[in-house]
Amino acid sequence: DTAVSQTPKYLVTQMGNDKSIKCEQNLGHDTMYWYKQDSKKFLKIMFSYNNKELIINETVPNRFSPKSPDKAHLNLHINSLELGDSAVYFCASSQELAGGVTDTQYFGPGTRLTVL
Amino acid sequence: AQKITQTQPGMFVQEKEAVTLDCTYDTSDQSYGLFWYKQPSSGEMIFLIYQGSYDEQNATEGRYSLNFQKARKSANLVISASQLGDSAMYFCAMREGGTNAGKSTFGDGTTLTVKP
């Protein structure tokens, strides 16, 4: 069984459109993340949710809105897509431990978004 | 200042030989975790190994070991007996505790090519 899954795997769309990427994890983790990997392979965190609450929100345009309906899901909705949004978006999950000690993040397979 | 530095954009190694991928980090936290991920050409992010800041012994996972030198703030990945399938991009990452809890910072990556 896939631990962290994302749909779709590929997404090609026109500039100005609105699109969503879905993420689900079946690991029982309480924290989920969205990362963006650009064409130079730089990986940067966008959002983090812990028990459905937003805990990290990096400097991301407000066209990007994450939604966590429950602990196992974290979806990413993008409004008014721009050319610069083209990238691979990774979802990840982890279990936060006591005392600020961090646990391993497990990544989904990625969604390659291409904006034309 | 960059929190995670991988100074080797590309590395080559002969099959069956060992290779060390460098990673240095910068943090003022006492509690943090260091991770290595592998990203093959297929694009997925594969967790390899984890080292906690309080772990006294170097982490090992099969052919992977982490050479953790806390005073030098380095966390190099050692791959023994390289295989052709090890050719990939490798990312070093750090997750800090405290106010940065849950936030991962990734290095720029090192592309490893294993030669037959």
Image (cartoon, rainbow, N blue to C red):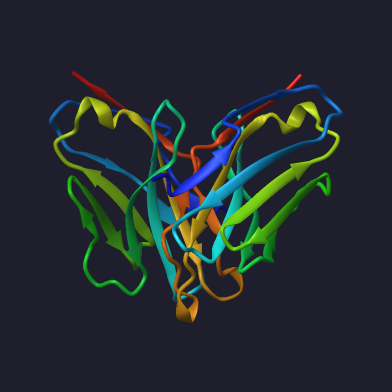
Farthest residue to the bottom: give it: A99
- The quadrant the C terminus of chain A occupies is top right
Is residue A27 something one can see in this rendering?
A: yes
Residue B88 placement (x, y as % from top left): 36, 30
Residue B54 placement (x, y as % from top left): 33, 75
Residue in view at x 72 percent, y 52 percent? A66
Residue in view at x 86 percent, y 28 percent? A16
State left or right for residue B74 relative to residue A21: left
Residue in view at x 43 percent, y 27 percent? B42
State left or right for residue B83 relative to residue A21: left
Farthest residue to the front: give it: A1
Q: Nearer the viewer, residue B33 or A56?
A: A56
Is residue B30 placed above or below B110 in the rendered structure?
A: below
- The quadrant the N terminus of chain A occupies is top left
Is residue A113 placed above or below A37 in the rendered structure?
A: above
State left or right for residue B12 relative to residue A60: left
Q: Nearer the viewer, residue B6 or A101?
A: A101
Is residue B32 placed above or below B86 in the rendered structure?
A: below
Residue A12 placement (x, y as % from top left): 69, 22
